Amino acid sequence: MAFADAMHDMREEMHDLTHITHVDAARQAYVALWGSFVVVPLLFGIDKFAGFLGVKWDGYLANWVHTILPGSDARAVMMLGVVEILLACAVALKPRVGGDLSAFYLVLAAFSAFALGGGGMVVLGVMFFAAAVCALAMARLSTTYHRS
């Protein structure tokens, strides 16, 4: 029954995406955030294996990440790719929990960017924090706009 409820909820969200101008503003915000927090982590997670975006992901790992995750840089990147794919699935099926977990992951990513230093990385860290706030907002909105 939980799978049927999840499919029904996703059908509602997809319907709202196709008829976005006929939906109230708060629902539009929720659907936009929900869609973003499903698609972007899924895309980046798959790219950590496939490399189709052309990003050298191991350059974004701070030294403290190397001490936590065992193995080589490539293995650590793949582990993070799995985490991102799981986060996308969690947001798709249980946005309240998935949003909170995504926010936690994004805060860790921000700390990693700050640890790498440099002007560009500090800006990236601030963007990660902003995305974490958006993930929390999506999780909060899901209590109103998501059934399961």
Image (cartoon, grey):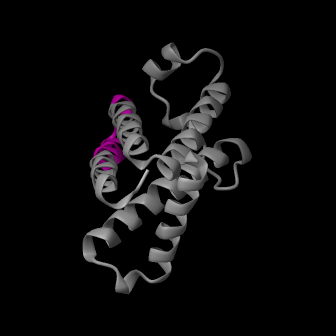
Q: How many marks?
A: 0
Determine whether, in the image, residue 63 is placed left or right of residue 82.
Answer: left
Q: Residue at x 60, y 43 (%)?
A: 56
Specify whether residue 124 is painted magenta.
yes
In the image, is residue 18 above or below residue 10? below
Q: Position of residue 41 (x, y in %)?
A: 53, 49
Q: Residue at x 35, y 39 (%)?
A: 100
Q: Residue at x 45, y 83 (%)?
A: 19
Q: Residue at x 51, y 41 (%)?
A: 87
In the image, is residue 85 above or below residue 76? below
Looking at this view, is 40 or 120 the one in front? 40
In the picture, residue 4 is in which quadrant?
bottom right
The magenta segment = 115-129
In the picture, residue 138 is in which quadrant?
bottom left
In the image, is residue 99 above or below residue 65? below
* Residue furthest front in the image: 1
Looking at this view, is 25 or 66 the one in front? 25
Determine whether, in the image, residue 116 is placed left or right of residue 68.
Answer: left
Q: Position of residue 74 (x, y in %)?
A: 67, 29
Main secondary structure found in the magenta portion: helix
Looking at this view, is 70 or 118 the one in front? 70
In the image, is residue 10 above or below residue 45? below
Q: Position of residue 115 (x, y in %)?
A: 35, 28
Specify whether residue 109 is painted magenta.
no
